[in-house]
Image: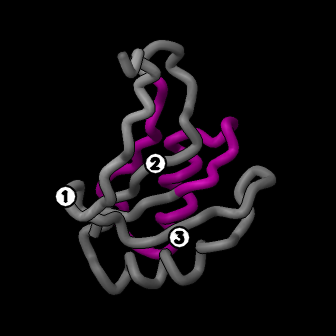
Amino acid sequence: MNIYVGNLAYAVTQDDLREAFAAYGQVESANLITDKFTGESKGFGFVEMPNNSEADAAIKALNETPLKGRPLRVNQAKPRGERPARSGGGGGSRW
């Protein structure tokens, strides 16, 4: 199961993420999303756990739990196609 982890403190590392979820089962991968220009964390990431019951247990246990001073937002990640479209806001001229 792919798990979304949000509201991460910028000090959280991929190893911190892996360690937090490993307490509930096998972790296949833990990835922080970073800004492509600065390399800094964007404050969210994804954890992949192959066993759904372990993943569910991790979601229930870790949601709203503080990690490095901030409460985590943890839920099952939605496939890319199911997310609402983002509106533009381009700032170009109307004329």
Q: CA distance from mark 2 to mark 1?
A: 18 Å
Crowd class of label 1 (few under 14; some 14 to 19; many from 20; radius 10 Å): few
Q: Nearer the viewer, residue 27 or 38?
A: 38
User: Furthest residue to the front?
Assistant: 95
Q: Nearer the viewer, residue 56 or 92?
A: 92
The reply to whether discs 3 and 2 touch (Cβ–Cβ < 8 Å) is: no
The residue under label 2 is 45
Camera-side mark, 3 or 1: 1
Mark drawn on residue 23: 3
Q: Amino acid at mark 3?
A: Ala
Secondary element type, mark 2: strand
User: Magenta span has 10?
Assistant: yes
The residue under label 1 is 81
The reply to whether discs 3 and 1 touch (Cβ–Cβ < 8 Å) is: no
Q: Which residues are magenta?
A: 6-35
Q: Nearer the viewer, residue 39 or 13?
A: 39
- Quadrant (top left/top right/bottom left/bottom right) for the C terminus: top left
Looking at the image, tell me whether mark 3 or mark 2 is earlier in sequence order: 3
The reply to whether discs 2 and 1 touch (Cβ–Cβ < 8 Å) is: no
Looking at the image, tell me whether mark 3 or mark 1 is earlier in sequence order: 3
Crowd class of label 3 (few under 14; some 14 to 19; many from 20; radius 10 Å): few
Residue 82 higher or lower than 61, as above or below: above
- Quadrant (top left/top right/bottom left/bottom right) for the N terminus: bottom left
Q: Residue at x 56, y 24 (%)?
A: 40
Q: Residue at x 71, y 57 (%)?
A: 67
Q: How many marks?
A: 3
Q: Position of residue 7 (x, y in %)?
A: 63, 53
